[in-house]
Every structure is written in C-alpha cells, then in structure tokens.
Image (cartoon, helix red, strand yellow):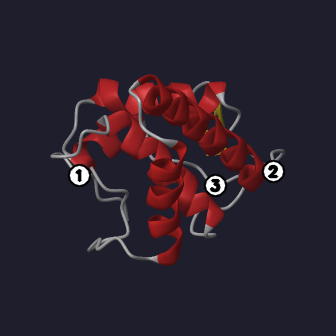
Amino acid sequence: MIVLDLQSRVPIYEQLKNKICELAVIGQLNPGDQLPSVRNFARDLGVNPNTVQKAYQDLERDGIIYSVTGKGSFLNEKILLHSQLERQYLQKLEQIAWQARQCGIKLTQIIDAIQKVYEGELSNDNDEKPD
C-alpha cells in the first residue's frame, strides 16, 4: 500500500504523511477508516516507530486524523481533505519560492520548473517529486 523512498531527501515521516493524504484523496482511505497501529505500521514499513508516531502527530495537528485513546488513529470525517492539502502544498510552495528568491533564482526559472511538472516533461518513474 505505501512505499517509502529511503534514499530521498524528504524525511521519512513527511513521505508517510504525504502518502496517507494521497490515499485519502484518491479514495483508498475513507473518512472514519482506522489507520494501522504505530507499531504494526512501523514494522510493515521497516521504519522506527518514532517515525510513524511523528507522522501521526503531525497529521493529527493538521486535522487530517484524530486519535481515540485505546482504539487508535482514524481519518477525520469532518474535514475537507482536498482543500486542506491544497492549502498545505501552497504554503510549502511559497516557502520554496521565498528560499529560491533568496538564492537569486529568477521568477522565470521557477515558473519554467513548475510548468515542466504540470506538462509532464520531467521523467519520473513513479510520479514522485524529483530530488
């Protein structure tokens, strides 16, 4: 169900958060669905349980999931997941644009890079973002 890229520069917990959100957006996870326990998920993914716990904490803080003591973590039924993800990705894009500006990257270069992504010009085997 979830495949993590251990060679990526993106932290594993971030990859896990993104994958859970993607599964929710495409309908493989539905509102109210229970997520695997931290220990079982960590074992299945081959990662440290603290990594899964951090991803779950961030998702809960962002309102994507909620926890019930003694029961587990569940995909939140009350959120508009798509608009929340859209807002998060736009915030990340703004941060990256700010950093690029600070490094002297021109706006036209940024626009060209984004346009390549949207036009599918980047060769990517598994539709992951480039490193």
Q: Nearest the camera: 86 or 123? A: 123
Q: Residues within 10 Å of mark 1 (few under 14, many from 20)?
A: few
Q: Amino acid at mark 2?
A: Leu
Q: Which numbered dot is residue 80?
A: 2
Q: Nearer the viewer, mark 3 or mark 2?
A: 2
Residue at 48% across, 42% down:
17
Q: Position of residue 32 (x, y in %)?
A: 71, 52
Measured Cα–Cα span from mark 2 to mark 1: 28 Å
Q: Which residue is mark 3?
A: 33
Q: Secondary structure at mark 3?
A: loop
Classify mark 1: helix, strand or loop.
loop
Question: Which tag, 3 or 2, sits closer to the chain's start?
Answer: 3
Mark nearer the N terminus (3 vs 1): 1
Q: Earlier in the sequence, mark 2 or mark 1?
A: 1
Q: Residue at x 57, y 52 (%)?
A: 21
Mark 2 lies on a secondary structure that is loop
- Residue 13 placement (x, y as % from top left): 37, 35
Question: Gap in Å between the C-alphas at discs 3 and 2?
Answer: 15 Å
In front: 17, or 29? Answer: 17
Question: In this rendering, does residue 68 appear at all?
Answer: no
52 relative to 118, above or below = above
Residue 116 left/right relative to 7 = right
Q: Residues within 10 Å of mark 3 (few under 14, many from 20)?
A: some
Inspect the image, locate mark 1, and give the three-letter code of the amino acid beneath it: Asp
Instruction: Give the tally of numbered discs.
Output: 3
Q: Quadrant of the N terminus?
A: bottom left
> Are dots 3 and 1 in contact, CB under 8 Å?
no
- Residue placed under numbered mark 1 in the picture: 5
Q: Mark 3 against mark 1, which lies toward the viewer?
A: 1
| Horizontal side, residue 62 vs residue 111: left or right | right
What amino acid is found at the position of numbered circle 3 in the picture?
Asp
